[in-house]
């Protein structure tokens, strides 16, 4: 093994990130690309951090809604169908509530 750059006792370090972090980073990356390429908007570190906080807040709300539906899927769906003025139908009617700004 002469000339090998990796010593025989080297270990591989693997980092794991949760799915929420991956999703947030992907949304943030898409937003940054859109702002800088399509809209030609200069971004500051503060603007990017603020958007990351907004995305995280949105994901927390979405996760809470999804867990409520998962806990009792039958009653949530029938309530929304029976009550068109319910909060859930308002979210579905307003696409801006479904995607982070």
Image (spheres, rainbow, N blue to C red):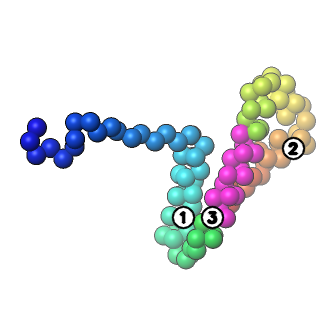
CA distance separating discs 3 and 1: 11 Å
Disc 3 + disc 1, Cβ < 8 Å:
no
Would you say 58 lies left or right of 40 here? right
Residue 51, given in percent of the width and then of the height, sits at: 65, 62
Query: Which comes sooner in the sequence, label 2 or label 3?
Result: 3
Q: Secondary structure at mark 3?
A: helix
Magenta span: helix, strand or loop, mainly?
Answer: helix
- Residue pointed to by mark 3: 49
Chain part drawn in magenta: 49-63
Q: Secondary structure at mark 1?
A: helix
Q: Secondary structure at mark 2?
A: helix
| Residue sitting at x 57%, y 57% | 28
Disc 2 + disc 3, Cβ < 8 Å:
no
Would you say 57 lies left or right of 90 here? left
Is residue 4 inside the magenta stretch?
A: no
- Residue pointed to by mark 1: 32
Question: Residue 87 got which mark?
Answer: 2
Residue 37 to residue 75: above or below? below
CA distance separating discs 2 and 1: 31 Å
Query: Which comes sooner in the sequence, label 2 or label 1?
Result: 1
Residue 11 occupies quadrant: top left
Question: Residue 43 got which mark?
Answer: none
| Residue sitting at x 74%, y 32% | 67
| Residue sitting at x 63%, y 71% | 46
Choose between 24 and 46: the one closer to the eye: 46
Residue 70 occupies quadrant: top right
Query: Which comes sooner in the sequence, label 3 or label 1?
Result: 1
| Residue sitting at x 79%, y 32% | 68
Residue 101, given in percent of the width and then of the height, sits at: 68, 60
**Nearer the observer, disc 3 or disc 1?**
3
């Amino acid at each position: 093994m002469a000339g090998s750059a990796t010593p025989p006792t080297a270990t591989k370090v693997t980092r794991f990130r949760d799915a929420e972090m991956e999703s947030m980073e992907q949304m943030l990356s898409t937003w940054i690309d859109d702002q800088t390429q399509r809209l030609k908007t200069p971004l500051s570190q503060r603007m990017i951090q603020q958007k990351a906080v907004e995305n995280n807040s949105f994901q927390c709300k979405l996760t809470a809604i999804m867990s409520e539906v998962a806990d009792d899927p039958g009653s949530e769906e029938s309530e929304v169908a029976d009550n068109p003025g319910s909060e859930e139908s308002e979210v579905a009617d307003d696409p801006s509530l479904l995607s982070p700004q």
